[in-house]
Amino acid sequence: MSDVDDIFGEMIESAPESVKKVIQSAAETKEKKVIKKKKSRKGVRGKSPEIIIENDLVKVIISPPPTQKIIKEFNIPIAVCVYGPKGVGKSLIAYGFNKGIGKFAILDFDGNTRLTIEKNIKKVKHENFKIWNIKGMINFSKLNKAKLTKHCYEVTKKIDKIWEEIEAYEPNFIVFDGYQRGVWLSEQSMRFIHDADPFGGVKNRNAWKERNFTLDKWFSSAQQIAKDAIIITVHEKLQSSADDSEESEREPKWSGAVKEETQVVIRAKQKKLDVMTDDLSFLVDVESNKLTGKTTANLDVTRAPYKFYDWILDDDFEPMF
């Protein structure tokens, strides 16, 4: 057996399943200076793997996903906000980032993450999702008005401690799912610190900086840990014009660094396709995109959400929806 055959054998054993067939095909031909390409559904996003045989050496080249290009250039994970009304598929669109190649660390603020994943995401690899149930830390049945703010303060301190667990998990993506509840939680914590009523006004206007400080700590921790992206799903709110002369604008219910440092803002929508079957189509508006400048309206991402993210992040990528 030749050295070249040895090289092929070793590469076939160590290569991902998505490129083994391509390597085997190249091994059979043993032609020099031949480039073969094959599309990979299980490989990383970006260009297809290339097999290059040159001077009796074999190289397998897989282009990095667009997120990695951005991280290499700016040294931070990208931040994407998916917002919209309740029940329009915000979480489903957020998890479209996963193409079977990355791990999600999810802070579940509204208690709906596990149900969404198990009921709606087909062929989900559960080892790719680890959920920290923040909603489960709040026991409303044993709370009253006097205890609420203190309890929320204690929960925020517990969240501060789970980042070591998340870091050990080494996630590609960190998700703040139901972020508006995180905003509420940090607000109640702020009210405890400043001895304010949980539902009344706050005399010291600077106290709101305390709320944003808590939110910013969480976001900064996610920036230090996530390998690819931070994804925020959040409800929308109506922002009225000053004189009510214009139609109210929709915007995410967000605060602090998340609002200032998010690069891509996506609004999720739904459209009923069939009244008889209640089949739904998931639509998005890309309202802001600081990465490539690509924006769009009413884009149907029901069948291929991961291609949608490739399109957002990569200047050269043209999806086939």
Image (cartoon, rainbow, N blue to C red):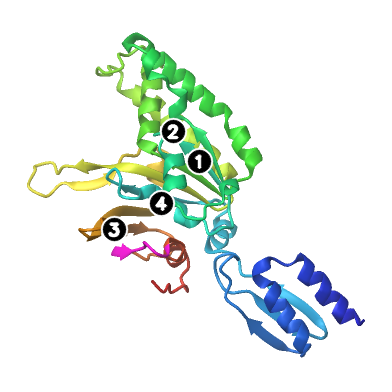
> Is tag 2's residue or tag 4's residue first in the polypeptide sequence?
4
Q: Does the magenta stretch include residue 301?
A: yes
Instruction: Name, please, the residue furthest toward the front.
Output: 276
Q: Name the residue under label 2.
A: 215
Task: Give the label on residue 92, or none.
Answer: 4
Whole-percent x, y for residue 111 in the image: 41, 34
Q: In which quarter of the image is residue 16?
A: bottom right
Instruction: Name, please, the residue furthest toward the right.
Output: 1
Give the alpha-carbon distance from disc 4 to disc 1, as whole Å. 13 Å
Element under disc 1: strand
Image position of 296 (left or right of 174): left
Q: Mark 3 points at which residue?
A: 279
> Is tag 4's residue or tag 1's residue first in the polypeptide sequence?
4
The residues colored magenta run 296-304
Which residue: 21% across, 58% down?
Answer: 276
Which residue: 36% across, 63% down?
Answer: 301
Task: Give the label on residue 106, or none.
Answer: 1
Neighbours of disc 3 within 10 Å: few (<14), some (14-19), many (20+):
few
The quadrant in which the N terminus is found is: bottom right
Whole-percent x, y for residue 205 in the image: 30, 23
